[in-house]
Structures are given as structure tokens and as C-alpha cells.
């Protein structure tokens, strides 16, 4: 018989169950990866069982968490019932001053907090954090049994939560990989704001995450900028093109660049320096070309480069024509930014002229310009580059020497240079009158 109020043994039993569940759950999550590997390789069945549970710990931990919450609720109700009856004897309701009644309520709450928070949560949590291995070994079996008993309730609660989430229109939860990526991005943003991470480091980390989502067409050199030689080229012509461009791997084509035959490596031609032009045939020295679709992801192309042990690939469009050429350097530049070597003398693609004023190359991606000014230029544009976007807005190709201006949002773009029917240089400046007065 429990008498008029719950007995202390039942209260203590529920409190100890809560404390054990807290300690066990904490210890299992605090075990280092190295320790888990040792448990998996152990000869003791109990150790291997713990390692097996931690391979997919969600079910085990969710069951323990629900059981611990249930213990907290039951302990709180039992304890409050006991304290209410005990304190009512000390502070009778009839005729008692108001402050005495409030004092009774405060004392009841203080005792509950002491038992539930300190003894059932904080103390076992700290013990488990300091000694995760022995605590996990002692309580893993208990946690496993409790989790098994509460598994139906965990499944029901999960299904109910999912149903309610759909009814209110909540999006699907992120996959574990996506969640980890978002957490890392958030930490990088916080570190950048505190000055612990430089802007260049932040951009590099973000570029690494975007590497898998970026297509080859976004990093390749377009066919109009390719350096290639016909199959009838002489040795002196190949040498001249290599010296002018600085490239050491040059595609060889048949009639036009849509018919690439292979790749000539300039290093293979060094032994032919003293040879006559009449006896030189590029096809005799070219190597097979790697052809990839322009929709291939950068990470897949990187894997192809490593597997084939090559540095360049010919990018083809959906019709089989040559869209451009992509190199290992292009892939690296998509992560670390532009890499200049002793043969590079091109202008910087984005050069700051003043406050909110930049000189921009026509081949700069629209996304880069949007990040530069913190604006959205075109969500559904068919073009990838800022030069292509301006051509689309103007509905024509500016003539050489012409400098038309286009205002997109709060940024004014002025065409500076046009070459080979393309916009090659642009001046971009944030309009000073665009800010609301």
C-alpha cells in the first residue's frame, strides 16, 4: 500500500532510472571513434555489441530519450503530490498568509529542480562525460533493453510528428550529409564574422562544397577561346602557338574544332627541334583525347583525370560538337581561385576600380557578379556569363568602340570593350541614387 501519497521508494526508483538513462545515453555519444573501433575488434561479445549499437545509434538513443522524458514526467508528478501533501501540513491553506502559501510553492519547486535537474540530469551527465568508457560498458545493456521496450512508442511519435509536419507544410528534413554541410557552412560564416577565418578561406571552403554540384561547362574554356592546330600544321606553327599561348597540351583537329583528333603534348616535340618542317606530321605525335559531356560534374571529371592520368579533356555538347576544353587547372581554380603562372599575362577577371566599382571580364559568371554586389540579376537567364546576359538585354552585339550602358537593379553596367563579336570587358558600378531616400 502506498498510503495517502506515493512512497519514496517509487520516486527514487523513477529518479534513478532517469539518471541511468541520462548517463548511458551521454556515455554512448561521448565515446571517441578510436574507442568504438577497439570495441568492434574486441574479443568480448559485450564490447562488440556496443560497437554494433553505435553503427546506427538513432534508434537506441531515441528510445532512451523518450524513456528518460517519461521518467521525468512520472517522477515530477509523484514528487509534486508528495510535497504538496507534506507542505500543506506545515502551511495550512485556511487562514495562512499569502506569502506562506507562495513560500510552500517555491520550496516544492526548488526540491523538484534539485532532484530532477541536478541529481537526474546534470550529475549523471558530467560523470558520463568524464568517464564515458566505463559508464557505457556498465549501462549499454540497460539502455538497449529500455530502448527495445519503447521502440513502438518511438515509431508512433515519429509517424505522428511526420504527419503533423506535412499538414503544416514543413519541408522534408535534410539528409545527414546535407545537414553536416549546412552546419559547417554556418560555422564558417560565424568564424568569418569574428575574423577567425579570412574571406579567401571562406570562399575556398564554400567552393569545395559546390564542387560536386558544378558542371564542367561552368569551368571549361569555351571553344571560341581554345588554342588548337589543324592536322596539317607544321612544327614551327605548333611551336609558335605554344610560345604565344603558354599551353603545353594543344588539341589537333581535322576540318574544324568540332572534329578533334587528339592532343599534342609540346614536351613530346622537344626532340624534333632540329627536324625539318616537311617531315613533321602532328597525327604521328598526338595522344588520344578524353571526351566528356558538358553536363558532367566537376568531381566526376576530376576522377576521370586521375583514372586516365591526363590533364585535359575535350568537352562536347549534346550534338557531339566541341563545346570547349577543360583542364585540371580549371578544376583547381574553381576551388582556390585564379592560378597565375609565369606564362599567364591576362588581365584579372574582376578588378576593383573604386568603392562599389569594378572592371569585370565578359566571361565572369553571373553568380560571381551577384555575390560581388549582393544582388540577384537574372534567375532564369539562358546565359551563364555577364557578357552573355548584357548581350541578351541589349538584344544585339555592341559594335567595336560602342559603350552602351545597362542598368540591372541597383548596378549600372557599361560595355568597355568588344572583340570577335563578344563583350570582353565591362565596367560595373553600384548606382548611388538606387538607395531609398
Image: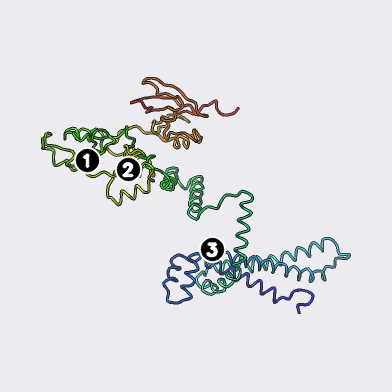
Comes first in the chain, label 2 or label 1: 1
- Colouring rule applied to residues: rainbow
Q: Nearer the viewer, residue 430 or 71?
A: 71
Res 144 quadrant in image: bottom right
Q: Secondary structure at mark 1?
A: strand
Labels 3 and 2 touching (C-beta < 8 A): no
Q: Position of residue 275 (x, y in %)?
A: 11, 37
Labels 1 and 3 touching (C-beta < 8 A): no
- Residue that numbered label 2 is attached to: 329
Quadrant where the C terminus is found in the figure? top right
Left or right side of 397 for 128: right
Label 1 crowd bin: few (<14), some (14–19), many (20+), radius 10 Å: many
Label 3 crowd bin: few (<14), some (14–19), many (20+), radius 10 Å: few
- Residue that numbered label 1 is attached to: 264
Q: Secondary structure at mark 2?
A: helix
Q: Is residue 27 above or below residue 340?
A: below
Q: Position of residue 11 (x, y in %)?
A: 69, 73
Alpha carbon of mark 2 to alpha carbon of mark 1: how far?
Answer: 18 Å
Alpha carbon of mark 1 to alpha carbon of mark 3: how far?
Answer: 55 Å
Label 2 crowd bin: few (<14), some (14–19), many (20+), radius 10 Å: some
Q: Position of residue 414 (x, y in %)?
A: 44, 25
- Find the residue positioned furthest to the right: 95
- Residue at image position (18%, 38%) is 282
- Residue that numbered label 3 is attached to: 58
Q: Secondary structure at mark 3?
A: helix
Left or right side of 435 for 336: left
Alpha carbon of mark 3 to alpha carbon of mark 2: how far?
Answer: 42 Å
Left or right side of 72 for 383: left
Q: Nearer the viewer, residue 423 or 393?
A: 393
Q: Is residue 403 above or below residue 80?
A: above
Q: Between tags 2 and 1, which lies in front? A: 1
Comes first in the chain, label 1 or label 3: 3
Amino acid at each position: 500500500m502506498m498510503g495517502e501519497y506515493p512512497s519514496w521508494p517509487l520516486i527514487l526508483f523513477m529518479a534513478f532510472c532517469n539518471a541511468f538513462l541520462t548517463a548511458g545515453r551521454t556515455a554512448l555519444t561521448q565515446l571517441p571513434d578510436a574507442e568504438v573501433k577497439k570495441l568492434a575488434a574486441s574479443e568480448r561479445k559485450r564490447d562488440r555489441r556496443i560497437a554494433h549499437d553505435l553503427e546506427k545509434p538513432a534508434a537506441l538513443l531515441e528510445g532512451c530519450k523518450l524513456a528518460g522524458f517519461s521518467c521525468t514526467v512520472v517522477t515530477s508528478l509523484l514528487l509534486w503530490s508528495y510535497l504538496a501533501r507534506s507542505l500543506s501540513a506545515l502551511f495550512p491553506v485556511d487562514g495562512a498568509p499569502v506569502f506562506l502559501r507562495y513560500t510552500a510553492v517555491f520550496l516544492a519547486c526548488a526540491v523538484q529542480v534539485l532532484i530532477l535537474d541536478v541529481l537526474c540530469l546534470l550529475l549523471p551527465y558530467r560523470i558520463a562525460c568524464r568517464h564515458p568508457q566505463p559508464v557505457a560498458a556498465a549501462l549499454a545493456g540497460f539502455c538497449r533493453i529500455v530502448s527495445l521496450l519503447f521502440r513502438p512508442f518511438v515509431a508512433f511519435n515519429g509517424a505522428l510528428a511526420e504527419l503533423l509536419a506535412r499538414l503544416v507544410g514543413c519541408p522534408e528534413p535534410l539528409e545527414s550529409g546535407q545537414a553536416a554541410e549546412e552546419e559547417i557552412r554556418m560555422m564558417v560564416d560565424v568564424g568569418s564574422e569574428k575574423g577567425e577565418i579570412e574571406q579567401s578561406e571562406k570562399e575556398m571552403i564554400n567552393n569545395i562544397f559546390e564542387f560536386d554540384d558544378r558542371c564542367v561547362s561552368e569551368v571549361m574554356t569555351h571553344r571560341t577561346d581554345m588554342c588548337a592546330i589543324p592536322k596539317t600544321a607544321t612544327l614551327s606553327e605548333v611551336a609558335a602557338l605554344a610560345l604565344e599561348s603558354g599551353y603545353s597540351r594543344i588539341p589537333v583537329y581535322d576540318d574544324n574544332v568540332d572534329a578533334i583528333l587528339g592532343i599534342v603534348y609540346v614536351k613530346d616535340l622537344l626532340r624534333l627541334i632540329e627536324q625539318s618542317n616537311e617531315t613533321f606530321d602532328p597525327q604521328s605525335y598526338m595522344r588520344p583525347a578524353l571526351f566528356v559531356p558538358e553536363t558532367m560534374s566537376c568531381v566526376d571529371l576530376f576522377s576521370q583525370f586521375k583514372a586516365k592520368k591526363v590533364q585535359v579533356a575535350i568537352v562536347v555538347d549534346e550534338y557531339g560538337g566541341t563545346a570547349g576544353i577543360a583542364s585540371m587547372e580549371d578544376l583547381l581554380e574553381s576551388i582556390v581561385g585564379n592560378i597565375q603562372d609565369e606564362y599567364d599575362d591576362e588581365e584579372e577577371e574582376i578588378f576593383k576600380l573604386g568603392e562599389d566599382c569594378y572592371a569585370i571580364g565578359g566571361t565572369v559568371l553571373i553568380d560571381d557578379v551577384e555575390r560581388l554586389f549582393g544582388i540577384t540579376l537574372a534567375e532564369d537567364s539562358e546565359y551563364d556569363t555577364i557578357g552573355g546576359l548584357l548581350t541578351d538585354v541589349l538584344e544585339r552585339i555592341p559594335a567595336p568602340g560602342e559603350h552602351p550602358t545597362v542598368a540591372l537593379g541597383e548596378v549600372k553596367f557599361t560595355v568597355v570593350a568588344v572583340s570577335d563579336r563578344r563583350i570582353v570587358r565591362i565596367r560595373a558600378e553600384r548606382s548611388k541614387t538606387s538607395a531609398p531616400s
